[in-house]
Structure formats: C-alpha cells, structure tokens
Amino acid sequence: MSTEAPLISDPLMELVNAFKAALRPTSAPPSASGCPMAMPVTFAGKAAECSGFLLRVNLFILMQPQQFSLENTKVAFLISLLTGKALQWAKAIWNSNNPIINSFEQFTKHFSEVFSTATDTLTTSDQLFRLQQASVNDYTLRFHMLVGASGWNKIALLCDYRQGLNPEIRAAMALYDDSIGLESFLQRTTRVSQRLAACQPPVTAPQSASLAACSPVPEPMQVDSTRLSRTERNHRISLGLCLYCGHQGHLICNCPVRPPRPVVSTTHSDVETTHLTLLPVVLHTTEQSLSVSALVDSGSFGNFISQECLNQLQLSRQRHSQEYAVKTIQGKPLGRGRIRHSSPFITLQVGLFHSERIRFLVLENSTVSIILGRPWLQQHLPELHWDPCDITSWSDRCYEQCLSNIPRSPPILIHLSSTQVESPEPEIPPEIPAEYMAFEDVFSKQAATHLPPHRPWDCAIELLPGAQLPKGKIYPVHLEAPDDGG
C-alpha cells in the first residue's frame, strides 16, 4: 500500500495560473469591443526595458477596465508577466504579504525604484548636456527621447539643442529667434539640414590613381566593412551608448578608441619648432653597439625605447608583467595607448665612464629612440646643463656603482717643508755676564719687538762752528725729462 505525499501549493503560482487561464481566448468570436492592444512582453529585470514595460502594462489595463476592477488583480497581471530575477523579487513581496500588493500605483512605483535605476548610466540631464549631433534626424530623435524625463523648461531645452548642433547648421539656425518655440525650432532645423545637404556639390568619382588613398579604412564597429544594423543602432541610441565602441560616457565624435579618418590631401605650413632636450648615449649588447639620442623628460613616468631602435639592436621584446595606459598631456592615448612589452636588459652608456644595466618599456610609433624619464632621474640625480644638453655631475651612488670603471692613477707622494720666521721663546733665559746685568732689558726679546716710548724733548745736534761743509753735486727733488737739444 503506497501513500502519496500531499502537494504543497504555492498561492502565488495558483493566482498567476488562474489569471492566465482567465485571459485565454474563448471559442466565441471576439466582439467588436475587444481590446486592440497586444499582450505585453515579459520582463526579466533589465533596467533599460523597465519604463517601456510599465507603459505597455498600463495601456493594456487602461483598454480593459472591466477585467481590472480590483487593485490586486492589476498587480497579479503585472506579476504574471515577470520572469527571472524580477519574478523572484515579486515572489518575495507577495509571500511576505506586503501592503503594496493591494495598490497598483504603489506597487509600480516601488517596481520602478528597484528596476529602472541603473548605476552605470548617466542621468537624463547629463545625457542631454553631452548630446552632440551626428545626423540631424538621429540627433533630434535622441533629443525627443530624453526631453520627457529631463524636467527642463522649454528655453533650457532649446538652448541645449542648439549647442549640440554642428557649427554649420547652428550658424544657419542663428536667423531664428527662441520665441518660435521648441517644436518649431526642431522642425526648421530638420528642413535646414535637408536643404544644406541638397545644396552640396555632387561628389565626383576619384581617379584610379587616388583610389587607394580615398578608400575608407575598416573600423572595429564595422564587421566585414558593414554598418551597424538598425536594431543595434537604435539600441545604442536609446541607452546613450557610443555608436563606435558601444561604451557609455561619450559619443562617437569624442570616442577615444576611434582612429582618425584618412584624408586625401593635407596642407602643410612651416611652423617654428622647439628642439628637444636630447642627450647622446650609446646602447651596448653582446653583439653590437648603437649610438642614439635620448630625450630627458622629467614628466615621463617611465624609461622607454622605441620599437624601431629595438629592431636595430636585433633584440626581441618581452611581455611585461603589468600593462600601462599611456596618455598625453591633453589626456589622449599616446601611440596605441597601451604599454604591454619591455626590452631585455641593455647596457646604457652616458658619456665616457657612466654605464648601467637598464630595462626599457617598449613604446611603439615613437619619434625618439630613448626616453629617460623620472625614474632614471630620481635614481642618478644628475646635474644637467640644458643648452646644450650635458651632464656636469652625478650622485654619490653613481660614483660607487655606475662610475667604477674610471681609470685611477697611482698616488703621488709630495714632501712639504716649512720655514719658521720667528724662533720660539727659549724656556731658559740667556746667560748675561755680570758686567752687563745693568743693561738686562737690552737682552729682552719681547722688549725688542716694540718701539721705544716717545720722548717729550728734542735732542739737539751741535754743529761745529766754522766747519767746512762737504762738497757734492746737488740733485733736484723732481726729475725732469732730458733735453733733446743738449
């Protein structure tokens, strides 16, 4: 005798199944007053589809008021259209007997708060502010999609729309004042764009010699050189995604990964260029040596070598352990924008005696062979003479490690001798004979270093009366130039 376990019924599933059975068409022919609305599609929880799903549900209920007289009936109908994580959320709300299941307005409000908020998308105001024209029709369509949820007034919307236009169309629309209204301004913009396109001269077929220069380069967004499908294009426009790479936060005109368009011809003008600070260096490998010029750049985050220079040294690059994103001072990608490879260790010689083993990051499409950046400057602390670029001094660390091969001459012994002018005072005073003891002060060395004291009297010199003075030639006090005449 076998016993069957009682089936556990789910009240939510029973209600959903009963409601679906009530909505199945009967065998009777539909009446003229039948609902013209199609059944809304199911919703799985995608934030981009939430507002459209609620709109279809509200329209379906609005067209059949006799079937949705109760609030919980409307809620049950909405739940019957849920799948995936949205159904799991509704099941938790229903099983907990939350009061919002008795009010369709509160339920849809809470439903919108849960599923229509996307943390990775821009707000409507941000999307309007960043909206730029690619084609006037697409631009106007995208603008209409954002206007309803923006909350902006008509004047602000018209000003934002005008700023997003191409300069040519914006200049043509300068004839119209803001008083014509937003809708009239949008319609006239479309007509002006169509007329400007019709006035453009026809594009003549290029000659066969320039076909290669005029052919467009296939872009990543074009699979097998084909354009986006209309469905994918509308999907990206509705979500505010870039039409080129499919990412958020920018439009196709500002896409950072989109390569520049090739041009047929360009006009070159002579401009004054600034010479870079280039330092002559020598790269040594086990096979060869190569003299190149290195750019000393304190603003560079690393030390770089060009792919061309690495090829000249016949060295293979290696996959680096870390990938770097390299940008210019304007924030644009430098080269391909990514550094993924590094060189093997190379001997770098600066000057005659400074040498080191160094590993460079490989920079593709570089116009300079070597870039010595901030890490190299912080390591060696050189003193630079900028014009011309030369290193005048190295750090103490360099004298111990990088300049160890400097030839040293043997030490030279120099003998120095000194002469003392004044002899030291003898410790024992000199012996003075007894007969000279009265004149002891005359023999004092210390007293001999001073002049005798000044006397107040004048010692007269007595002349002999009647003595004959000595005869001699008298010379003048001032010398005069000799007389050439004799």
Image (cartoon, helix red, strand yellow):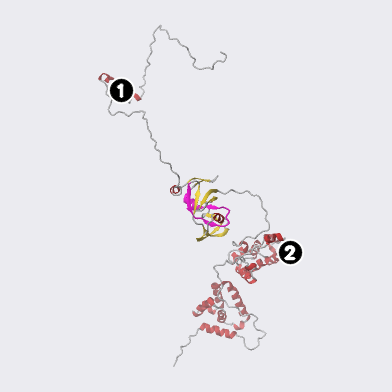
Picture coordinates of residue 173 (x, y %)? Answer: 70, 61
- Left or right: 163 in relation to 341: right
- Left or right: 5 in relation to 221: left
Q: Residues within 10 Å of mark 2 (few under 14, many from 20)?
A: few
Q: Which mark is residue 198?
A: 2
* Outermost residue, front side: 287
Residue beneath the point at 65% across and 71% down: 230
Q: Say which of 179 and 251 sits in front.
A: 251
Please check the rendered image and state whether residue 374 is part of the magenta-colored stretch, yes or no: yes
Q: Which residues are magenta?
A: 353-381
The local secondary structure at tag 2 comes to helix
Picture coordinates of residue 310 (x, y %)? Answer: 54, 55
Q: Amino acid at mark 1?
A: Phe
Picture coordinates of residue 64 (x, y %)? Answer: 62, 82
Residue 381 seen in this snapshot: no
Position of 243 relative to 446 (above/below) = below
What is the distance, in whole Å, between disc 2 and disc 1 at their CAs? 127 Å
Q: Which mark is residue 443?
A: 1
The local secondary structure at tag 1 comes to helix
Please check the rendered image and state whether residue 136 is part of the magenta-colored stretch, yes or no: no
Q: Amino acid at mark 2?
A: Ala
Q: Residues within 10 Å of mark 1 (few under 14, many from 20)?
A: some
Picture coordinates of residue 180 (x, y %)? Answer: 70, 64
The number of numbered discs placed on residues in the rendered structure image is 2
Q: Say which of 456 and 439 sits in front.
A: 439
Position of 175 relative to 292 (above/below) = below
Position of 20 relative to 474 (above/below) = below
Q: Quadrant of the C terminus?
A: top right
